[in-house]
């Protein structure tokens, strides 16, 4: 039940079937899912509109060489690993991807903080928003954590959960009803409701809608900035809802650039950054010393973070 | 009735009185309004937190010279006019300003599209939003324009206006009431409402609030990008609400950099950009020819825009 | 006599012949010149390595629509003209191009000031530079302008021209000879010259080479920033040598995005920006008034610039 | 023997003595060295022209609070450490510094690759370059490393070193002599050499100068990007000459923002980034296991890098 109309789905099917010849770098695994929406949350999606480059394009830029050369695949892999390990950034900027994303406004507000990207967003100044809003699945109705102001604790249950869902649904419904009333439009048909009324301007009427309403945009970004986005937004500290989008994009990355995907997992996503003090602790431990938080000079919180990383 | 508490106003007064010595470029007229909120809309404001540079700093950078030199004031003015006229950008990047802005979320969403700036926004993941929302003044309740999808037509009146204001106020009130209920907090005291309930996590509860709620941020930007922002957002095509912020910042610019302010008005804000075709029309008219839209090769819409610029 | 080896030219031919199927936006006219070097100056070139999007992709982003839709070509043209005329930028950011450029270092230093682009440059820390340097054609040996510190006057002739060419060639030759000597390498064979010597490190030896030596890079940029680059660098005020590159890229733009190319010429490249004061003069002239510089309030220089734009 | 004229030094002294009152954040330790050149290499320098913010400004932005608040110094320190440890970036963007830097062209070419900064460079299109070039000190005349294409090996000695210095000096001298000859200017007096000659335009004549010639610029950058620059350029893999500039700027950072400086050293400059595979090795070692390269799944090179980090 993806939120694309039958007309749109037909257009996607047609666009995919219309194949052209190109001499550009082309990735078959990505062509297969081109234009197809990947479902995220209740009404959102991510779909690939266009892309530039493949794993070889990164290698090619790193070598500023001509054509594919005759290097074997394991040499490409070794070079990509090297570039990732040593935090080289410019060769990864040589790939680009354009995504069409449908997402709740409050997630769009986090996402847009990544400034080095190109965005065309659906404008509620020009157009009327659809009646589509995000309601969390019951298992994601997290309670406020008491140890971490930013985080989620356990899951709400029973009456409290039911009441939250009721509020979210009712208020979303009512906001939209009033949005259309202010626009002087019929909620079902989008036709003028009362010819004797003028209707509030769209750019003002929209302000009655809550931030769980869905917006959509084209988002185009180079691979280096995409990896940075994914590292932050697929992280356990990111809000669940944006993590769902990050994970959908990671599944795209795996098809698009398999060598880069592996390097990204090893050297970024699952890597650890350890401070000078932390490294001092690690070295003393490796030398067989018994180190305690008191002796480490680190705060309790920082010490605990280090022990979690070291699984001690 | 600025939306700062008495405590905050006391802190501002104290901060201003605590003067230090500096050898940096300093602008007395800006020091006078430092930290002071300039009211915008019903609950918003803009205030200057810090700044770097003055008109001379632009000249200094353009000359990459040492110290203030001995040039007279009218030479500085001439050089700033020259730089602005010829679209030089880097000398204007040598000034910087840091503002504290309180603004409705739907305006913040337009504003943030200017990517070349630094932003720290109040986070509703961490903190509880205040009950402050934007309600347009009756004279700004514009109806939808029928000739321009993006624009505003006349002003709503009578019952229709009353109903819009009623909807906006009631829905804003109710959203907040439910926001606090989901957080399990008392709306007046912010204390726990029902100890037997857990409360929804803040990062989810916020999604019930409409985009007319106020957020706030520190926004730091260089002068070149600020002028670009002001040109677009003080323009008649910009939404009224963001224009109000742009105008407040222009009043700050006038105090901060009087020579740049004058050049900006002449060469940017009130200047005209005329296409090759349009210049062809102007030249023929100046030569005494009678030119019509049909002869011009321009579309009706474009011709009308040109005639408006030429006041013909 | 393009500065690509036979091996490289063979690779280019092979890469072009290797066609793949894609559902992405594809431009046949650009596919035809893909990978092919366009000669610039004596040893430089520009060639297209990859691209994303076509004229329709701009329209599609502007509409945030799905697929190509059924709009006729003249509607696409009208929308692109509208976007360009009203300085919309984000739809143009949805196209991207990757170029391989070979250019003298002093031109690379101007070029790189355009920051919103991705660059992989040939590194003289890692690799040995080829013996290729720029010598202006005799007709470009401009003398220093006396009215404009930045500009060129007439062309040097006779003995003075001959002496300049002699200096440039000899010093370039000698610098390279010494570069290779410091590296302890044979200038012809790149083999070790004297096994008893160690050779200066490459990252230091390179500092003996003058800025007319050629470097090369992959340069990837979105269309909006490309147009900005072209407007500044194809301008009569830009240095001749970088204008040659801008013109080569404009010839690529014409093949890639014919509608955007036309709009760019009309609304950017050949358009005029006239100040508020200047518009005052134009309006008075159009009203039949006789306006003089003295009455205009403009400086002599600014007045002259305006009269040149108006061809008066 | 700093490369500033007596006139310039007098101006600096005067500028420093001219103190104004400000309510802005002010750092006494930085005011003391304001405008003063810190020597780098043989003719280069770094000097602070202006700055915005102090350690408290970072804390203030992180709290989006009003005024300095009443937090004790160790709470500021704890928050800055927290922000640095968790890779928060936006609060650090709230500080800004403007530097005047004199540096060899080949270093300027590395430096400028950091795009998120504002730059006004001395223009050799407009102005005549001084006769100032970089000659490495004998102890920095490194030989090419044979294990690392990018790196330096031991130091050249004896005749080979003498010959390198002779080449660099002679070619630099001769280039400048010819530069001035082409400009038709007297090398000592900058006066016209031969009234019967026109002189080559400056924008062309400059191309005879090698990249060890000094240029200069104003460079303005926010703290977050500055720290990024310093981490890369103070690193052992960076070229010695740019490291010297990075170290000079680190000494400025220490005076400007002592708390941030300490956090930067611990969490960035001397921290370690360890891959998922690497962390697997560390954990097994901490568990008392004997791990070898063969068992680790890592390449020899990567294993060696890990062992160096672990000091095993």
Image: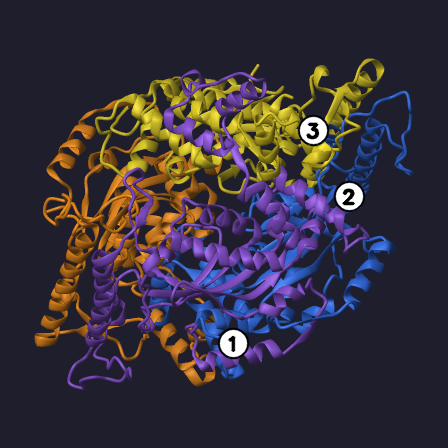
Chain colours: A purple, B orange, C blue, D yellow
Count every numbered label the image shows and give the total. 3
Work out whether residue C222 can be spotted. no
The image position of residue C61, as x and y in percent, is 48, 69
Residue at image coords 60%, 41%: D125
Position of residue A135 relative to residue C240, above or below, is below
Q: Classify mark 3: helix, strand or loop.
A: helix
Residue C133 image label:
2
Residue at image point 85% right, 33% down: C177
- The lab-note entry on whether marks 3 and 1 share a chain reads no
- The disc placed on residue C67 is 1
Instruction: Please state which of the two labelled residues, at mark 3 or mark 2, is closer to the viewer.
Output: 3
Q: Are marks 3 and 2 in contact (CB under 8 Å)?
A: no
Answer left or right for C270 relative to B236.
right
Left or right of C182, for residue C88: left
Label 1 environment density (alpha carbons within 10 Å; few <14, some 14–19, many ≥20): many
Give the position of the N terminus of chain D as an image quadrant: top right
Q: Do the residues under discs 2 and 1 have CB atoms within 8 angstroms?
A: no
Residue D304, numbered label: 3
Q: Secondary structure at mark 2?
A: loop
* 10 Å crowding of disc 2: few (<14), some (14-19), many (20+): many
């Amino acid at each position: 039940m993806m939120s694309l109309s039958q007309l749109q789905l037909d257009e996607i099917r047609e666009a995919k079937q219309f194949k052209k010849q190109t001499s550009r770098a082309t990735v078959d695994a990505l062509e297969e899912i081109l234009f197809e929406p990947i479902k995220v949350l209740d009404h959102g999606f991510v779909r690939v509109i266009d892309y530039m480059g493949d794993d070889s394009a990164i290698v090619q830029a790193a070598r500023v060489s001509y054509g594919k050369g005759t290097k074997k695949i394991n040499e490409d892999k070794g070079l990509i690993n090297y570039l990732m390990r040593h935090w080289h950034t410019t060769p990864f900027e040589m790939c680009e991807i354009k995504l069409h994303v449908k997402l709740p406004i409050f997630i769009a507000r986090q996402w847009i903080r990544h400034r080095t990207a190109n965005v065309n967003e659906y404008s509620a100044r020009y157009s009327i928003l659809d009646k589509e809003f995000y309601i969390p699945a019951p298992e994601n109705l997290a309670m406020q954590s008491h140890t971490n102001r930013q985080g989620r604790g356990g899951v709400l249950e029973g009456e409290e959960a039911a009441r939250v869902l009721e509020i979210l649904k009712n208020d979303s419904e009512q906001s939209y009803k009033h949005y259309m009333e202010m626009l002087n439009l019929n909620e079902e048909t989008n036709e003028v409701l009362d010819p004797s009324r003028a209707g509030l301007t769209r750019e003002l009427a929209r302000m009655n809608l809550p931030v769980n309403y869905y917006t959509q945009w084209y988002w185009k970004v180079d691979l280096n900035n995409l990896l940075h986005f994914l590292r932050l937004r697929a992280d356990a500290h990111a809000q669940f809802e944006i993590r769902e989008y990050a994970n959908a994009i990671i599944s795209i990355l795996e098809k698009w650039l398999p060598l880069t995907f592996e390097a990204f997992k090893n050297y970024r996503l699952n890597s650890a950054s350890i401070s000078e003090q932390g490294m001092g602790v690690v070295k003393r431990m490796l030398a067989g010393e018994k180190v305690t938080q008191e002796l480490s000079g680190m705060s309790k919180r920082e010490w605990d973070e280090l022990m979690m990383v070291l699984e001690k």
